[in-house]
């Protein structure tokens, strides 16, 4: 049994939710589906923790699907980076599903519950698969699995705007996925292989030839494989849409706002991070940072877009009265921090980027869970209706305050760790402007978080807040588990920053997937 | 279209052949051109044709929405289940498992794999058996047969379901008018708030 688990560990966290998802539809009862999906999520979480420990012990683990060896077959390549992320996804998936019960009964019609569970598991399958796989086309397939199920999940929302938001996301997401596919196609045409590690090796000869010639007359021009350049552009833009990087973020606010609260919790905590992960893989595993950041000015592009994005999205967040939308804009800003770290391409920067994926997942997950509690009891996401809820729902409000501190990056919360690492990395790279702007942007986070805290604690209670009671115990407990995690990982960083540091070291050593 | 006798008669004549051709493509897919996806589309087209000519209620009497929904899930389950089954059965010949093709990762390969005879996910060699040899498919053949069956079932069901969803739109709009108005009002309220 143990041998079986150890041997199939890379594939089981993907297969289990994939098996249970159709089973939920087949059995068709929402109670059975609930129990099954909870079971699947927690087992997956357990297995991915086991996977992390195995990777720490053995190093890279490779699994050949169907027994076909790479580069001919599909390979699942588990390394410090993706095992860490898989554990995060599975953990958030399990905890959010445990939390979901009362919120789901309130927001989604009972007849659709079994479909919700099935879609939720499929979404998890897709996200986990994107992490685990070492095959570029497989990344696309899993991206589609997770995206399609996310569209459906978003459209389950209560208002009629939910399907519209899902449709908006569908259009943008499909464009992103198509770009990704075009990029993959071009790479396949160049190298004749889809295995990411192998593409990286095959591209070497093109990389050597690639230079930007400073034209003596006329502008500098590209000499080298144009296909490679175009492929890189398509992959980058495609993934940027999926990551919701600033100018390509338009799908995100509506989908997060109108999706059912539970869906927002899970998607906000995981989906964009997995795209960031895929981007890291493409840049570091396939094209190499030298190509992307030294030969091509992707680092300047990334950090300028990130910084503009951080400011624009944070300022936009300040003006939102809808709290879900406010957090959605904050998510766009936070993706900026991750990309900032990644674009520095040094040990500290990359560690910061990776650890912020994890920390932000926890913080945003916690905050959206708090929103879910308020929505259940107040029936509204408008700030006016939240006035004075601190008196009737003290625990939920406190959770918001702690989570908010994490978002700002106050010491002792995990947000501090990622911002501190990022700041160190920026100083090290002598990017003082970036460092200064980053600190100023944190002040914007103070405003958009604290406005809500003020409304909760220092305003006369609204009609709805007067009648409200504390959120159900199960939702409160699970929210506090995540909130506690944000504090724990703010103090004890062996698992978060430590593992992220391993991952960064692995990537910088030319870690092909 | 129910009132055109020629269309009705020709449709009824054609449907069995469409179904037969669909099944041929399905079960020939493991030897030659064809396979689950194509077969699924062909099989579904028979149902869709029936629905177009005789109306939605008629085709729903043959293939109820509930059943189609279960079939979608069943196909996926067959596919994934085949994969899981191969891992549970394991290879009788002591398969090569995850032996790496290059030596860079030699220290991570499991030297004990051969004794354990683990088969990877979807490694059809695990499906080798000796029951009715030469008559029942086995090994790679059986594996492909099973997953193509899964694909075929799901594709058929999904195609029919898409048809139901589009064809059923007019029904739902009739009864959904009130709800639509309520939804518009709620969005208007949100905008003013």
Image: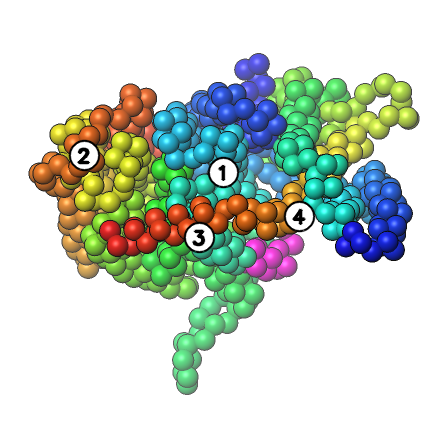
Left or right: where does residue A61 sit relative to residue B139?
left
Other residues around mark 2 within 10 Å, as few (<14) / some (14–19) / many (≥20): many
Residue visible at 74% across and 41% down?
B58
Residue under pointer 2: A465
Residue occupying image coordinates x 55% and y 30%: A21
Tell me which numbered mark, 3 or 2, is placed earlier along the sequence. 3
Q: Is residue A185 magenta?
A: yes
B130 in relation to A96, above or below: above
Answer with left or right where residue A15 lies relative to residue B32.
left
Q: Which residues are magenta?
A: A181-194
Q: Is residue A489 left or right of residue B18?
A: left
Query: Please, what secondary structure does the residue beneath circle 2 have?
Result: helix
- Say yes or no: labels 1 and 4 on the same chain: no
Residue identified by numbered label 4: B163
Q: Quadrant of residue A399?
A: top left
Badge 3 is on which residue? A164
- Residue at the spot x=69%, y=25% of the render? B86
Identify the residue position indicated by label 1 in the image: A123
Q: Is residue A82 left or right of residue B28?
A: left
For residue B71, which quarter of the picture?
top right
Is residue A352 depicted above or below A66 in this figure? below
């Amino acid at each position: 049994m143990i041998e079986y688990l150890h041997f199939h560990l890379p594939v089981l966290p993907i297969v289990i939710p994939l098996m249970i998802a159709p089973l939920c539809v087949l059995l068709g009862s929402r109670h059975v589906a609930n129990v099954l999906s909870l079971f699947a999520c927690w087992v997956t979480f357990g297995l991915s923790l086991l996977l992390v420990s195995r990777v720490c012990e053995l190093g890279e683990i490779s699994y050949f699907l169907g027994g076909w060896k790479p580069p001919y077959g599909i390979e699942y390549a588990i390394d410090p980076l993706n095992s860490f992320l898989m554990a995060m996804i599975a953990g958030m998936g399990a905890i959010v599903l445990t939390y979901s019960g009362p919120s789901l009964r309130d927001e989604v019609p009972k007849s659709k519950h079994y479909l919700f569970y099935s879609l939720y598991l499929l979404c998890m399958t897709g996200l986990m698969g994107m992490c685990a796989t070492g095959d570029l086309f497989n990344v696309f397939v899993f991206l589609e699995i997770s995206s399609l199920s996310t569209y459906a999940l978003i459209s389950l929302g209560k208002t009629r705007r939910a399907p519209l938001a899902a449709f908006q996301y569908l259009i943008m997401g499909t464009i992103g996925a198509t770009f990704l596919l075009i990029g993959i196609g071009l790479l396949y045409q160049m190298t004749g292989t889809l295995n990411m590690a192998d593409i990286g090796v095959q591209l070497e000869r093109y990389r050597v030839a690639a230079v930007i010639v400073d034209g003596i007359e006329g502008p500098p021009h590209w000499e080298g494989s144009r296909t490679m350049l175009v492929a890189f552009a398509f992959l980058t833009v495609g993934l940027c849409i999926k990551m919701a990087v600033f100018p390509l973020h338009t799908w995100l606010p509506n989908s997060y706002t109108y999706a059912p609260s539970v869906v927002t919790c899970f998607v906000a905590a995981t989906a964009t991070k997995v795209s960031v992960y895929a981007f890291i893989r493409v840049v570091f595993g396939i094209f190499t940072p030298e190509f992307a950041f030294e030969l091509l000015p992707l680092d300047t592009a990334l950090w300028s877009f990130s910084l503009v994005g951080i400011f624009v999205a944070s300022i936009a967040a300040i003006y939102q009265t809808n709290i879900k939308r406010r957090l959605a804009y904050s998510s766009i800003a936070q993706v900026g921090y991750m990309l900032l770290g990644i674009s520095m391409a040094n040990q500290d920067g990359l560690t910061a980027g990776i650890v912020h994926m994890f920390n932000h997942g926890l913080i945003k997950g916690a905050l959206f869970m708090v929103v879910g509690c308020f929505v259940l009891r107040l029936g509204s996401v408008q700030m006016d209706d939240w006035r004075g809820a601190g008196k009737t729902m003290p625990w939920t409000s406190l959770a918001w305050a702690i989570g908010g501190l994490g978002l700002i990056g106050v010491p002792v919360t995990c947000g501090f760790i990622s911002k501190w690492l990022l700041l160190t990395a920026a100083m090290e790279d002598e990017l003082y402007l970036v460092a200064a702007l980053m600190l100023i942007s944190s002040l914007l986070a103070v405003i958009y978080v604290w406005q809500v805290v003020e409304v909760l604690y220092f305003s006369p209670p609204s009609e709805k807040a007067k009648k409200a009671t504390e959120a159900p115990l199960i939702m409160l407990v699970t929210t506090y588990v995540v909130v506690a995690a944000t504090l724990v990982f703010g103090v004890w960083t062996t698992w978060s920053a430590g593992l992220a540091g391993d991952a960064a070291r692995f990537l910088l050593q030319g870690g092909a997937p | 279209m129910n009132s055109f006798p020629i269309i009705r008669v020709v449709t009824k004549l054609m449907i069995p052949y469409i179904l037969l051709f669909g099944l041929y493509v399905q079960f020939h897919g493991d030897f030659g051109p064809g396979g689950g996806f194509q077969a699924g589309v062909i099989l579904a087209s028979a149902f869709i044709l029936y629905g177009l000519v005789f109306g939605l209620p008629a085709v729903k009497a043959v293939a109820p929405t509930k059943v189609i929904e279960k079939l979608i899930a069943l196909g996926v389950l067959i596919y994934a289940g085949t994969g899981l089954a191969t891992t549970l059965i394991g290879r009788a010949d002591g398969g090569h498992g995850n032996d790496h093709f290059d030596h860079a990762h030699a220290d991570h390969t499991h030297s004990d794999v051969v004794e354990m005879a683990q088969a990877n996910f979807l490694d059809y060699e695990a499906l080798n058996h000796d029951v009715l040899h030469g008559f029942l498919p086995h090994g790679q053949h059986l594996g492909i047969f099973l997953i193509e069956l899964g694909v075929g079932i799901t594709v058929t069901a999904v195609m029919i379901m898409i048809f139901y969803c589009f064809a059923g739109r007019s029904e739902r709009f009739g009864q959904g008018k009130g709800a639509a108005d309520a939804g518009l009002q709620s969005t208007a309220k949100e905008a003013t708030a």
